[in-house]
Image: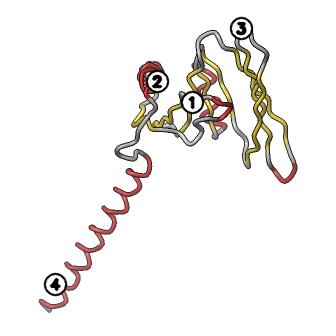
Amino acid sequence: MKARRYVILVAAVAFAVVFSAAAQAQVSQRCPSGSVLSDSAYHDAPAVKEFLARHGYLVRCITSSTMESTAQLWDVAGFQADQGTFTVFFLPRGEDIKVSETPASHGYYRYTFVRTVPGHRPRRYAYRSDGREYYLRHGDWLFLVWDARIANQLRDIL
């Protein structure tokens, strides 16, 4: 009887350790430690975090973004909030950007960026995405959101 209780206790402890490790791995996937932002994005990212907090968004962490260099925009940060994940591009002051979406074949979407700097010719950039993306502008911040629900929430506060 004692041996059976011991086996059950060991199994319960093992389950707790595995479950705890899995939960920790899930949290660390959401907010990787040691993530590095570009220097210029780092200076602007806290202002976005504060703005979002005033509107009920709890930002857990700010990370680098795989979208860096899209349309040659280098100041980019990833935001992981309770509501979900999104990216913010920090636009150079005085620069305008227009983003257009064109459905493509096989469920893809083509996104075209037209960047305009006063005194210069507009520059075009394009890429293809395998899912719908939502771009929202607020001042010098361009939000990129992959979830329609989050895009609608952000649209209401921007």
Spot occupied by residue 142 in the image (x, y as percentages of width and height): 62, 24
Dot 3 amino acid type: Pro
Looking at the rendered structure, the secondary structure element under dot 4 is: helix
**Residue at x 34%, y 65% (from the top left corner):** 19
Dot 4 amino acid type: Tyr
Tag 2 near tag 1, CB within 8 Å: yes
Task: First in sequence, mark 1 or 4: give its number.
Answer: 4
Q: In this view, does 119 lie above or below 151?
A: above
Q: Is residue 99 above or below residue 96?
A: below
Q: Which residue lies furthest to the top in this view?
A: 119
Looking at the rendered structure, the secondary structure element under dot 3 is: loop
The alpha-carbon separation of the residues under discs 3 and 4 comes to 75 Å
Task: First in sequence, mark 4 or 2: give its number.
Answer: 4
Between 10 and 78, the one lying in front of the other is 78
Dot 2 amino acid type: Ser
Dot 1 amino acid type: Trp
Q: What residue is disc 3 on?
A: 118
Looking at the rendered structure, the secondary structure element under dot 1 is: loop
Task: First in sequence, mark 1 or 3: give its number.
Answer: 1
Callout 1: 10 Å neighbours few (<14), some, many (20+)? Answer: some
Q: What residue is disc 4 on?
A: 6
- Number of the label disc, if any, that sits on residue 74: 1
Q: Which of marks 3 and 4 is in front?
A: 3
User: Which quadrant of the rendered structure holds the N terminus?
Assistant: bottom left
Q: In which quarter of the image is residue 87?
A: top right
Spot occupied by residue 15 in the image (x, y as percentages of width and height): 30, 72
- Number of the label disc, if any, that sits on residue 40: 2
Q: Which residue lies furthest to the right in this view?
A: 105
The alpha-carbon separation of the residues under discs 1 and 4 comes to 57 Å
